[in-house]
Image (tube, helix red, strand yellow):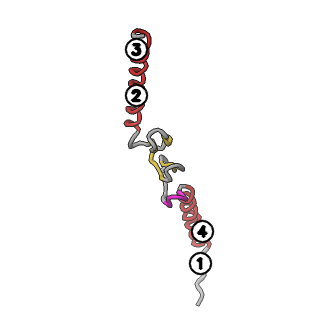
Amino acid sequence: MQIIKEESEIELENDKAALINEAVNIYKDRLCRTCNIIKTSLVSHCRTCNHCIKGFDHHCEMTNSCIGIRNRLNFILFCNLAYVISLIYIYEFIYLFLFLY
């Protein structure tokens, strides 16, 4: 005996299938093809390190690391320290060059 489905049941199944396909496509767009993980909205892939980084800003060649959420404060402190040290170095160089020679 063959069961004949009503049109509303068929439409409901088609709607469910469409919703499932739409959800799969959303996650397929956020899939990192290199790391094979589903990325959130803040995650980006670094080509240099070959890792996904949350809050990715850039890859710093000076520190040889990616700058993201977890080390952004340390990077800012490093940049400020490098700036202060360079100012001290320039001041000492000018002082030695102008006043001692």
Work out how far the residue at label 4 is from the one at label 3, CA to CA, in angstroms. Answer: 82 Å
The residue drawn where x is 52% and y is 49% is: 48
Q: Residue 80 shows which numbered tag? A: 2
In this view, the residue in front, 72 or 29, is 72
The residue drawn where x is 39% and y is 25% is: 85
- Looking at the rendered structure, the kind of residue marked 1 is Lys
In this view, the residue in front, 55 or 99, is 99
- Quadrant location, the C terminus: top left
Is tag 1's residue or tag 2's residue first in the polypeptide sequence?
Answer: 1
- Quadrant location, the N terminus: bottom right
Residue contact between numbered discs 2 and 3, judged by CB atoms under 8 Å: no
Q: Of helix, strand and loop, which one carries label 4? A: helix
The residue drawn where x is 54% and y is 50% is: 47
Q: Residue 41 shows which numbered tag? A: none
Q: Residue 14 shows which numbered tag? A: 4
Q: Residues within 10 Å of mark 4 (few under 14, many from 20)?
A: few
Work out how far the residue at label 4 is from the one at label 2, CA to CA, in angstroms. Answer: 59 Å
The residue drawn where x is 44% and y is 40% is: 63
In percent of width and height, residue 54 lies at 44, 47
Disc 1 or disc 4, which is closer to the eye?
Answer: 4
Span highlighted in magenta in the image: 31-36
Residue contact between numbered discs 1 and 4, judged by CB atoms under 8 Å: no
Residue at numbered disc 3: 96
Is tag 4's residue or tag 3's residue first in the polypeptide sequence?
Answer: 4
In percent of width and height, residue 16 lies at 55, 66
- Looking at the rendered structure, the kind of residue marked 2 is Asn
Work out how far the residue at label 3 is from the one at label 1, CA to CA, in angstroms. Answer: 94 Å
Q: Residues within 10 Å of mark 2 (few under 14, many from 20)?
A: few
Q: Of helix, strand and loop, which one carries label 3? A: helix
Residue at numbered disc 1: 5
